[in-house]
Image (tube, rainbow, N blue to C red):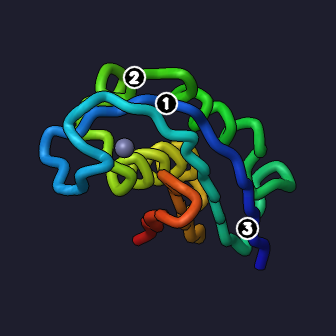
Amino acid sequence: MYILKLKTGFSAAHQLTNAYDEKCNASIHGHNWKVLVEIKTEKLINNMVIDFKKIKEIIDELDHKNLNEVLDFEPTAELIAKYIYDKLVDFLLKNKKIEIIVTVWEADNASITYFE
Ligand SMILES: [Zn+2]
């Protein structure tokens, strides 16, 4: 079994319409989002789990963006984690025996983990 872990991040703004957290409210504001991608697999493709660069590419698409403009859903940390997960699933579809776990930190002490 192999476990890939990539820690990276991106800086981006968002605005939430249904915010119930006073600090993360309806005003547009930015975060330095941190992301941890973990991929577990027994089977390698081209002797790799996945090229680290491919994961970076998916996440770099969000860097220095207004997430409300580039994503077609409300950009909560929850849905951003699922978005990155889904992009990785699309790419890794040919490898059925994989487990993907994506954690997104909106702040140092606040994270969301998504997996299926
Ligand atoms: Zn926020």
Q: CA distance from mark 2 to mark 3?
A: 37 Å
Q: Is mark 3 within 8 Å of ligand 1?
A: no
- Earlier-in-chain disc, 2 versus 1: 1
Extreme residue in the bottom direction: 1
Amino acid type indicated by mark 2 = Asn
Q: Residue at x 64, y 43 (%)?
A: 9
Badge 3: residue crowd in 10 Å (few <14, some 14–19, many ≥20): some
Q: Nearer the viewer, mark 3 or mark 1?
A: 1
Identify the disc placed on residue 12: 1
Amino acid type indicated by mark 3 = Lys
Instruction: Indicate the quadrant containing the C terminus: top left, top right, bottom left or bottom right.
Output: bottom left
Q: Residue at x 73, y 55 (%)?
A: 6
User: Measured along the vertical axis of the image, is residue 72 above or below residue 52?
Assistant: above
Q: Residue at x 54, y 48 (%)?
A: 88
Left or right of 67 in this view: 5? right
Q: Secondary structure at mark 2?
A: strand
Q: Is mark 1 within 8 Å of ligand 1?
A: no
CB atoms at circles 2 and 1 under 8 Å apart? yes
Amino acid type indicated by mark 1 = Ala
Q: Residue at x 25, y 31 (%)?
A: 27
Extreme residue in the right direction: 47
Identify the disc placed on residue 67: none
Q: Quadrant of residue 54?
A: top right
- Earlier-in-chain disc, 2 versus 3: 3
Judging by the rendered image, the residue that carries numbered circle 3 is: 43
Extreme residue in the left direction: 18
Q: Quadrant of residue 97?
A: bottom right
Nearest to the observer: residue 86 or residue 46: 86
Q: Secondary structure at mark 1?
A: strand
